Image (tube, coloured by chain):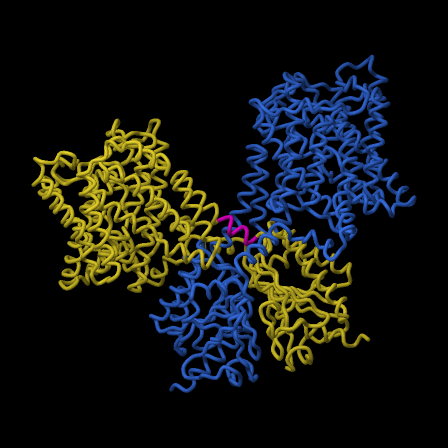
Chain colours: A yellow, B blue
Amino acid sequence: MGVTSDRVEYVCRYGGNGTTTSGVNVSIAAEVTMEIHSVCLPPKESTFQKLKHRLSEIFFPDDPLYRFKDQTWCKKLVLGLQFLFPILQWGSHYDLNLFKSDVVSGLTIASLAIPQGISYAQLANLPPIIGLYSSFVPPLMYSLQGSSRHVAVGPVSIASLVMGTMLSEKVSPVQHPTLYLKLAFTATFFAGLFQASLGFLRLGLVIDFLSKATLVGFMAGAAIIVSLQQLKGLLGIVHFTTKMQLIPVLTSVFHHTKEWSWETIVMGFSFLLLLLTTRHISMKKPKLFWISAAAPLTSVILSTLLVFLIKSKVHGISIIGHLQKGLNPTSTNMLYFNGQYLALAIKTGIVTGILSLTEGIAVGRTFASLKNYQVDGNKEMMAIGLMNMASSCTSCYVTTGSFSRSAVNYNAGAQTAVSNIVLAGTVLVTLLFLMPLFYYTPNVILVAIIITAVIGLIDYKAAYKLWKVDKLDFLACICSFFGVLFISVPLGLGIAVGVSVVKILLHVTRPNTLVLGNIPATQIYQSLNRYKEASRVPSFLILAIESPIYFANSTYLQERLLRWVQEEEERIKANHESTLKCIIIDMTSVTAIDTSGIDMVCELKKMLEKRSLVLVLVNPVGSVMEKMHRSNFLGTNSLFLTVGEAVADISASWKPQP
Amino acid sequence: MGVTSDRVEYVCRYGGNGTTTSGVNVSIAAEVTMEIHSVCLPPKESTFQKLKHRLSEIFFPDDPLYRFKDQTWCKKLVLGLQFLFPILQWGSHYDLNLFKSDVVSGLTIASLAIPQGISYAQLANLPPIIGLYSSFVPPLMYSLQGSSRHVAVGPVSIASLVMGTMLSEKVSPVQHPTLYLKLAFTATFFAGLFQASLGFLRLGLVIDFLSKATLVGFMAGAAIIVSLQQLKGLLGIVHFTTKMQLIPVLTSVFHHTKEWSWETIVMGFSFLLLLLTTRHISMKKPKLFWISAAAPLTSVILSTLLVFLIKSKVHGISIIGHLQKGLNPTSTNMLYFNGQYLALAIKTGIVTGILSLTEGIAVGRTFASLKNYQVDGNKEMMAIGLMNMASSCTSCYVTTGSFSRSAVNYNAGAQTAVSNIVLAGTVLVTLLFLMPLFYYTPNVILVAIIITAVIGLIDYKAAYKLWKVDKLDFLACICSFFGVLFISVPLGLGIAVGVSVVKILLHVTRPNTLVLGNIPATQIYQSLNRYKEASRVPSFLILAIESPIYFANSTYLQERLLRWVQEEEERIKANHESTLKCIIIDMTSVTAIDTSGIDMVCELKKMLEKRSLVLVLVNPVGSVMEKMHRSNFLGTNSLFLTVGEAVADISASWKPQP
């Protein structure tokens, strides 16, 4: 063993064969002249260097300061401003052609955003006007700070729904409308604060724990609950539960059959059919995206006209009524920072914050990868967070990048965040001048818009693919689906995250172990079970562990490895083959080890020695090697770089003996 | 690609070079004639078979039914009985020589068990007699069922301490002694039920989550708290806190200086010194184990005599007083199955159950590995669990295999569980005839015995080794230490388990990625950073991922891999090397993948294709291969069995092009 200044190399030899350089002729594997290579320790690093490296990988995996390297101070300032306000970066290259595209896409998404805004506000049990306010300030804020060029910002169904449910379970929006509004703004503020903090503290990894499988189940469950709850509006029921679970909702529907209003039902289902048909057409032919994009506004105009024309004859249809003209009023005085509902507001803020963040980041990344540019996750979190904090002071509730509107924006040819400014401008005109036009808009049309939007969240194809590819992912999906449907939104999400984490732990607790064999005439050793051409090497048992060795699996691994040895010995006995002499463990896939793991390997070595078996380790990765070295385990052990070299060297060392 | 009945092989080729058999001459790596091998899918298994295999690895890793295979029914019955009652297995070979050894060791541990039993009962705030009862029935039960030959059963310090703390925080043992006793028996019952259920349901993996690092910290914290609490007895203080945290205990000691009794202090510290000295001697010279084994009983006898002689002159020393003669009374009527404290009893039962189980199993495994026999963890859990359930009906509290007594038992030459029967017999004689002798035993001697026992739990060498080898293990250790010291026992344990789990998750969330290079004249590819002799292969970037690819790391890995590509392109540009054409990812250490992971790889492939780069995967493990196959990802992709073959084949396919 040679110790040099910055690295230690382990060269191990058996018996009297002391050559460490070359020239061991191998008869078992390929007939190749073989040099035995030593196993190196990774370059030495101090604890501080290691911690720094580790922390930078945890918090700065994307190396955000990369482009600031080797720049003048002046240039650094410009880059810093461009980093904070991406508009400064593309603003200088902006031209008329880009502007034309942005105006077209901006107007298209506005036609979708206005009816959706009103509907989603209703979903959150908020006054319709809040939905419009929330389609004005947030897009402006995002266009300054956001790094995506295609995201269209505004209220989204999932966050609206969750906020509506969580708040209305504690505070009735009908009996205490002001308190409810205050709590909604406060929750928005905390959602923004939470999002911005995650971004600022570079804790983007938190949202990674909401896996796609979990979200598929969660969104399907939420969509079903929302659709059922919309039966209130679709059937014209007046008295309805505020609860979210499946059973109270269905009970409410069928206990109030007397309140059903046929006029509402006819109008609702007709427009629902229209909207679903246009959606279906646009999904089949993505070029016709404008059909489904224009459908909501068209339905609102048609239904409003209809109600205006028949208003003297029909009375059962409830309408939006008077909406106040004017821009967003400030709402700083509405924020609620002490009192018994503060905890509720914070909890709602965190749950809606994390959900809207997940949607916003996913939307940004999807369209960025389609156009081959990168979106900085942590930066985007700060942009969305600051946007929500500002929104909460201007009478808006939680907003984020919406999947449906961003897709329309992308298809309509949006080039930059200017399309969001055009959207905000259109909403501004609406707020200032067009509010009276919504007086006769029937509520049932908003219901139809909501149902059409949420039905798109049920992605049964994705669920089927999960089932096909990964049963445990499917289990996480099903858990979040039923959790949301029968328990509650935060608990359903919690259960699903728990299942995902348990899945990871289970993989670590009960890892795979394989018996390897040599593929004839090569130095390749592969699983005997998988590669039929691979064959056992006489006197050797070659095992591979497919997992880190941790406290959670060291006992299992010890038992399992001993069982392999025992089974091999029995097999050899039954077949009268040459006795087992050496156990080789291929450590290539053992990507980490802890102190329990090292103890396990030591113990295993001792137990095998008592049975006159030699234990040899092959190719431990850097960190494993380092820890074994530090625990002084290696002094008495044998290491090789490849299984082939281990087999060649050890069997060569046996030759002189009779 | 050839699909056969039970396995699919993937052979991939580039460009026009269609040969799939052999004969590609490699110039980059070793000049060896190279055959390209195909990557196989694992043998097909139905979902049910897979589930069965998975469940059997989770619950039956030790294949407990192994020896029942290919046996007659009659033999199976005998084996089954022997499995349940190991005494039937070794009973038939039992002879006089074994019996002699067992009698000597049984008497030795009895001399330790009697004073320790009385002391530990005091630690659990129970009457001293309960400690003796608990050294009679449990050893008898264990000798019938336990599979270890060296474990000595009885009350242990940690479980006594935890039970004493958790119960006395809610119910005062002084004001409500009967209720307290009821709760202790009930907690023992639930501890046994929990242990037996874990064993029966084969959930032994639960105790694996208490890592050694956690236990080192936990035991040290608990030992410090106990030692400080014993200052009550050592200083003769009468009024003392029932709390467990550091601060109230220290406050109690120094707020009652007037109650300090100098007689108690002198006697206590003298015997403490004696006990610590004998302990030190036995630790230095393991052959003199009997010195520390005999010290407690000697101290008890000496101090009792001393008090008896000076009783008329000195009054400050509190004594045990009257102890009732006779065997364990039944306590089934004392079990408490409804009422407000049931939850407390269950919680205490689970915490003490899991702690005593951890100690018992660890003790059993340690001595089994010294004598090279195996202890079945799940079987042992059932034995300990049933023992505790039976104990709770015979006036005993929680017992398990004790580390200190088992070590003495082992050193005194115990051969079978008969030493436990001898121990029980000696305790029986004590209970029936010798109880009056303890009348003048001073309480302070019990305090000295407790302190000597718990000081041994502070394993600062182990903590230093944790620091040296694995900083994160040390963090878990420190968390449980301070958690126990300043918060509470269950919370401290919970925090430590949390830290351990987060450590596993962190490894998965931010895995290592490496750039590999070729070691000249070989087919070995290793980390460029670690092996200085390894060199880059022109036009290739060879990366290795050291972790499963999961939802929790897929975003990170995508960003990180793209950063490697970008850095490599910049390096090539700076050094004017040949352009990058192909990215090879070595998947050997990617031991699992989920649907998010597969999506990530697909996406990465698309993104690299947009940059005119080819992505090739090397040696995916069985389960990863299967999932990629099922998600139809492989159709458009390229796979190789080794990095060497990939490099050879791809560069060969480039040659015809100019």
Q: Residue furthest top?
A: B312
What residue is drawn where x is 25% and y is 45%?
A: A450
Residue B134 sits in quarter? top right
| Nearer to us in this view, B380 or A57 | B380
Residue A502 drawn in magenta: yes
Looking at the rendering, the stretch of residues picked out in magenta corresponds to A501-508
| Nearer to us in this view, B139 or A651 | B139
Taking the image as shown, residue B342 lies to the left or right of residue B227, namely: left
Taking the image as shown, residue A124 lies to the left or right of residue B188, namely: left
Q: Position of residue A560 (x, y in %)?
A: 66, 56
Q: Position of residue A553 (x, y in %)?
A: 61, 52
Does residue A525 sit above or below A355 in this rendering? below
Q: Position of residue B386 (x, y in %)?
A: 70, 36
Residue B425 sits in quarter? top right
Does residue B653 sit above or below B64 in this rendering? below
Residue A249 drawn in magenta: no
What residue is drawn where x is 29% and y is 47%?
A: A454
Asked whether residue B92 appears in the rendered view, the answer is yes
